[in-house]
Image (tube, rainbow, N blue to C red):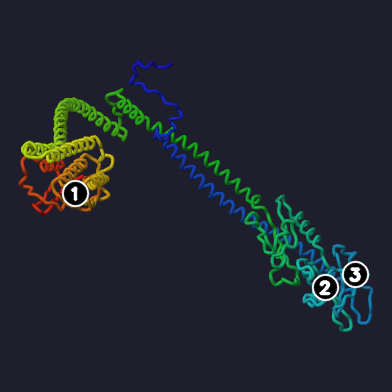
Amino acid sequence: MRRSLTQPLDPTKTPREPWWQRLNPWRHFAAALGWAMFTLVVVGALLAAEWAASEAERHVAKAAGVRLQQTANQAADALLTQLQLRLAAMRATAAQWSLQPGQGADWQARLAALQGQQPELSWLGAIDGQERWLAATAALQDADMLPGQAWLARARQAPVVVLHRSHEQGDLDMLVLAVPMAAEGGAPPGVLVAQLPWLWLQAELDAQLRALGDGTPVELLLTGPAGRVLAGPPAVRALPPGADLSAAGRYLLGRASASPAGEAGPGAQDGAWQLWVREAAGEALAPARQTHRAVLVGVLAVGLLAALAAVVVARWLLRRLDALARQALQVRQGLRQAIDIPAGRDEVHAIGVTLAQLISHWQEEKAALTRLNAELDARVAARTARIERLAQDARHAAVTRERLRLARGLHDTLAHSLMALLTQIRLMRKLGPRWSREQFDAELAGAETVAASGLGEARAAIAQMRDAGVHDNGLGPELQALLQRVAERSALRVEAHIAAAAADLVDERAATVLAMAREALRNVERHAKAHSVTLSLAPQGGAQAGGDEPAPWRLVLSDDGCGFDPAAMPEGHFGLVGLREQAQQLGATLHIDSAPGQGCRVQLDFAA
């Protein structure tokens, strides 16, 4: 049901807000407290989970390392045992054979019988004490290079296992087993040599992996001297020597020495054989990550419950403060005039007392403000009437100023021309009867010229009155144009020194300064009989135009004419009077320095 706009509101009831707005921390302190507690618990949960995860990963990694080390040791022992068994079988067989000087033997049959007993040996050969081949089960690439090897001398004394690198193919290694063969009659002992294929070595690693398997996917790798991978998965065997077997931390490693007794051969000094057990770090650390998730979910759940509980408790504790806030809102809306002070002696009671005092003081100030507004309205009405009277006075003053301006304009144009024309007419009237016809016509022509000149000057003055040149172009450009017109219509040499900042002077004060300059130049043209005139306009005291405050300026106009006495002006001439009146309107200072035969200098100091 909707309430009508004209239906009055019940001041004792306020609309109930939606439940989701009660969770807004900007509207309710209880919600802010709950969100703050939830944020703290979440941060604590993240920190605790990270700490628990790091500790669990450290312990699991340590345990996995111990387990992988044990696995590597077991696999290395088993692999060495298999090699030792092959060496022991070869040594037992070689002990049954002897090298007798001058007596041959069926070595080919003997080697074939031994290979039948140990089929994993892919090749067998016998070398006598002179390092000559006696026989071999099959042709071996690079077999002629075996005699003369340093490890072969050691094999005459004790069994050795060697990685022999082919001279023709430098990247091809052979796993060679060698045991001594005794010789009779003081002859040097021989050597029984066998080759184990890499497939047997890989098969042994796979067998050890199956024997040690406990359900955890691991890999066995065998590296030789200089970190060369001898056996292992195909992807690992393709790695270069010394490569990182942990793959930048993606695998956990266990290592054990797998060097057989009597290891020899090229590169043996670079490091022993190593058996590596490799396990994926993701699989090994899975329990720790599960612990991490369990701790995080558990702590977040506890934090959420604690935050909800904090909201409920905070709302119960702040119920009186919430009621006080609703009453204050109703006072602000004009639905109440005062609030009910909560009972008790706690902070909520103190807030209620203070708020009640503030509302009472506010009501008193409101009444006083109402009275003050009424008084101000009366004062405004009186001031408005006074301002209207002042506006009428200002309009009258503006009309008076305009009349003076027109009077000065008429003086500058028509008065001069009419005065000259009147003088000419009086002279013709007085002396006309004595003149000849030619003289009389000449005087008439002069009077006509004066009348035409006055008419032109009147039209020019009217055009200047209609033109707002200063407001459009600025004082500086208008002075330049004025000097140009004077130079064009007279024989005067003009010189101007006008600051560029004068182009920013465009107000009524600038228009008055332009009018004063125009009147002064007109006086120079008509009365000074000068040959040159100089005009300068510049700011004074380092001031700049265009600022917020008026800046001092100085206008100087000087000529080299006949000069005059400023204190003895003839009656009926108002040029200097008009200049002084205009300077007074500007609040400016006007100085006129002149003397007969000394020229004239007009200086105007004004602010604009």
| Earlier residue among tags 2 and 1 | 2
Q: Nearer the viewer, mark 3 or mark 2?
A: 3
Lateral position of residue 337 relative to residue 142, left or right:
left
Q: Nearer the viewer, residue 141 or 175?
A: 141
Q: Nearer the viewer, residue 344 or 206?
A: 206
Q: Position of residue 110 (x, y in %)?
A: 92, 70
Q: Residues within 10 Å of mark 3 (few under 14, many from 20)?
A: many
Residue 252 against residue 384 in the figure, above or below: below
Q: Position of residue 431 (x, y in %)?
A: 6, 39
What residue would you read off at disc 1? 555
Residue drawn 30% across the image and 27% down it: 332
Q: Quadrant of residue 413?
A: top left
**Numbered disc 3: secondary structure:** helix
C-alpha gap between disc 3 and disc 1: 131 Å
- Any part of residue 408 in sight: no
**Numbered disc 1: secondary structure:** strand
Q: Amino acid at mark 1?
A: Leu
Q: Amino acid at mark 3?
A: Leu
Q: Which mark is residue 111?
A: 3
Q: Nearer the viewer, mark 3 or mark 1?
A: 1
Q: Amino acid at mark 2?
A: Val
- Any part of residue 425 in sight: yes
**Numbered disc 2: secondary structure:** strand
What residue would you read off at disc 2? 179
Q: Nearer the viewer, residue 223 or 543?
A: 543
